[in-house]
Amino acid sequence: QVQLGDSGGGLAQPGGSLRLSCVASGSIFSINFMAWYRQSPGKERALVAKILNGGSTNYAGSVKGRFTISRDNAKNRVYLQMNSLKPEDTAVYYCNAFISSDYGGPLRNYWGKGTLVTVSS
């Protein structure tokens, strides 16, 4: 069994910062890419940022220059540093990862339970 535990959400003022963290635990052989998605009421879940094994990153246009994704491969962790927060960043943020539990085994898609970020004055 593999679990993703995401945390770090909370209330921030516009212009403020938050740092989200996610740890993968359980039967892990290898992790392909790790990512953060978000979903706000009435909207579909959307990619915020992703980071590949080699460290290359990809960001949604709306967060580019404000958010930074990083990972610690030794600790199976991924982070999302969110700066210059805006009210429209308010959403539940979900950690996502493709993980293989065995040598040569298939990559499976896992999700965290989500952490709520609220940006409001």
Image (cartoon, rainbow, N blue to C red):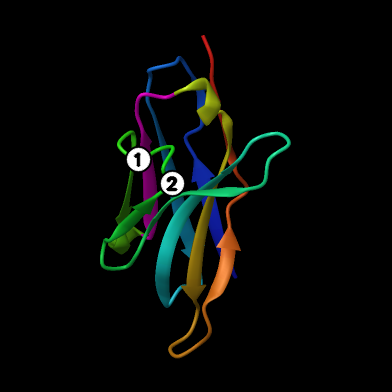
Instruction: List x then y, in percent, for residue 27.
Output: 51, 73
Nearer to us in this view, 104 or 82: 82
Give the Cα distance between marks 1 and 2: 6 Å
85 versus 107 height, above or below? above
Q: Secondary structure at mark 2?
A: loop
Residue 19 covered by magenta stretch:
no
Identify the magenta region: 76-85
Q: 68 left or right of 103? A: left
Q: Residue furthest top?
A: 121
Residue for point 33% across, 33% down: 66
Mark seen at residue 60: 2
Residue 77 covered by magenta stretch:
yes
52 versus 121 height, above or below? below
106 versus 53 height, above or below? below
Whether the residues at callouts 1 and 2 have beta carbons within 8 Å, the answer is yes
Q: Which residue is mark 1?
A: 64
Nearer to us in this view, 47 or 72: 47
Nearer to us in this view, 95 or 102: 95
**Secondary structure character of the magenta stretch overall:** strand
Label 1 packing within 10 angstroms: few (<14), some (14-19), many (20+): few
Quadrant of the frame with the N terminus: bottom right
Q: Residue 85 is drawn in which quadrant?
A: top left
Give, as a three-letter code, the residue at label 1.
Lys
Q: Residue 114 is drawn in which quadrant?
A: top right
Q: Secondary structure at mark 1?
A: loop
Q: 37 left or right of 65? A: right
